Each structure stands twice: as C-alpha cells, then as structure tokens.
Amino acid sequence: MADDTYTPPKIWTFDPENGGQFAGINRPTAGAREEKELPLGEHPFQLYSLGTPNGVKVTIMFEELLEAGFSDAEYDAWLIKIFAGDQFGSGFVDLNPNSKIPALLDRSGAEPFRVFESGAILVHLAEKFDYLLPKANPARAETLSWLMWQMGSAPFIGGGFGHFYVYAPERYKYPIDRYAMETKRLFDVANNQLAKTEYLAGDYSIADIAAYTWLGNLWHGAYKGSDEFLSLHEYEHVGRWVKAIDARPGAIRGRLVNTGAMAERHSAADFDAVEERSLFDPVRKRADV
C-alpha cells in the first residue's frame, strides 16, 4: 500500500496548483489584484455578495426588515462571482480588505461607510432598525452568544467538512471523519437547545438567521447529500426549526438573491420574474459563478 503520509518541509512554500476547485483564486496574499469599481444603485444600502450561506444571511435580514415594514431598508444586491475573482477588484477590497462576501456600503446617513463580515452586518442592521436583536440583557447576551457560536462554527462546516468532503482534490478518511464529527456535534448543540426553546435564543433573531443558512443548507442535502451521510434526520428539533424558517416570507425571498434564480436584486418587483417553483424551494441554490 502506498504511503500517503505528508511530511511538512521546514519552510512552507505556496504551490498554486494544489488548491482543487479554488486553485485559481486562492493565494497566501491579500489586497486588490485589479482596478475595478463597484456598481452603485439608488437605494440606501448597497450589498455586494453571492448566494452562499454567509451571503444569504444578509439578504434574509434585509427581506425580514422589509417584510416587517421597514421601508428604509431597501437595498441593491450586486452579484460577486467569487470563482471569477470579483472579490479581488479594488472597489470590493476597499469595502472588505479580507476579500470575502458579503460586504455592505451603508449610504443611509450623512457619510457613507462600510460594514464587512456577515455577523457584523447582521448586528449593524439589527441595531439600526431595532429589530431581531433585544436591547436588554439577558435576552441580548443570549442572542449575541448564539450569533457568535455560529460565526465560530462555520469554518468547521464549510472550510472543514464541506471542503474535505466535496472540494478537496483527493478524499482522505482522517479530515472527513474529523470534520464530520465536529459538524454532527454542532448539530447536537443546536438540537439540544431547540429542544428547550422555539428558536436558538428564545424568540426569532439574527442568531437564527445566521445559523439557518448553514444548518439548513446541510439539513436539506448540501455538499452532495450531507444530510444522508451525516444522518441529519436524527436532529428532529433542528429539522422543526429549519422548516419553520423555510416558510418565513423574508427567508423565502432572501435565499433567492444573488443566486442562479435571481442574480441581482434592486426592488421587490424583481421577485415577480422568479419561477414559482424557486420561490418555495427550501434548498438554497448556488449562483452561477
């Protein structure tokens, strides 16, 4: 049997060919790779994103705000094609020096400013509109705790399990087992909490939006059938919670934005052109990147 054990060299060097599906864009350096301005729409909020779990957090939040009657939350959502390297254009890097979606330009006040990282954008919008984030403790602390739980957990699911199970150039038992175990543990954490509460922090909040886009994706079979591979049907309270959020009008609309079903979103009328099947399909669709 061949020995596949890897012995790290004394000093690591970058191998641009060893990146699987991401080899064309991943580099060990930051910063803009080309001069490229971002488009601007007419609304107070300009979102630059893609319909991945992190991107969908923000579009669901905007649609929840609009559903609740906050008309000042109108936004333009521009598609960032990450496999084409849009996130390395100078305009995007000015908004997010980490070159990751989503990135937001808030023009609702006297001076425009940037907000980047999905959790920061959720908190910013929740505080701005006083919605889905309690003002007083202990409810506020509980909500922020579950939000940060998700933010810290996402790398184990996406960069860990998803990467080694689907995207890595070769499949190896150890990393898949390692991150499958951790993903199931995270589902168990959520399941234990949701056995006691309707939503993660009690009432529906930004913590649920953040966790739903990741746990819901897997529960519905993302990563080529992860629901079966990980026996996610065992987490019945997570399943109840996912289905409840699936049915929310804001979530229905938000999970379609910046995807193959709706590349960009500039007004509520854009949803009129979406196929009815897509509107009620709980499985989030990846954009054509």
Image: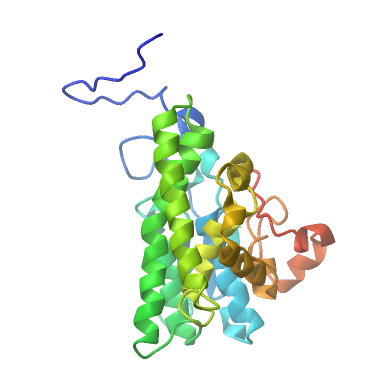
Residue at image position (48%, 80%) is 108
Which quarter shows the N terminus?
top left
Q: Nearer the viewer, residue 40 or 68?
A: 68
Q: Nearer the viewer, residue 97 or 101?
A: 101
Outermost residue toward the bottom?
Answer: 136
Query: Where residue 66 sits in the image (x, y, percent)?
Result: 63, 80
Query: Where residue 185 sits in the image (x, y, percent)?
Result: 43, 54
Q: Nearer the viewer, residue 195 or 200?
A: 195
Q: Quadrant of residue 118?
A: bottom left
Query: Where residue 28 sits in the image (x, y, percent)?
Result: 31, 36
Which quarter shows the C terminus?
top right
Residue at image position (63%, 70%) is 245
Residue at image position (44%, 57%) is 186
Outermost residue toward the right?
Answer: 276
Q: Quadrant of residue 228?
A: top right
Q: Is residue 11 left or right of residue 200?
A: left
Above or below — where is 223 with respect to 209? above
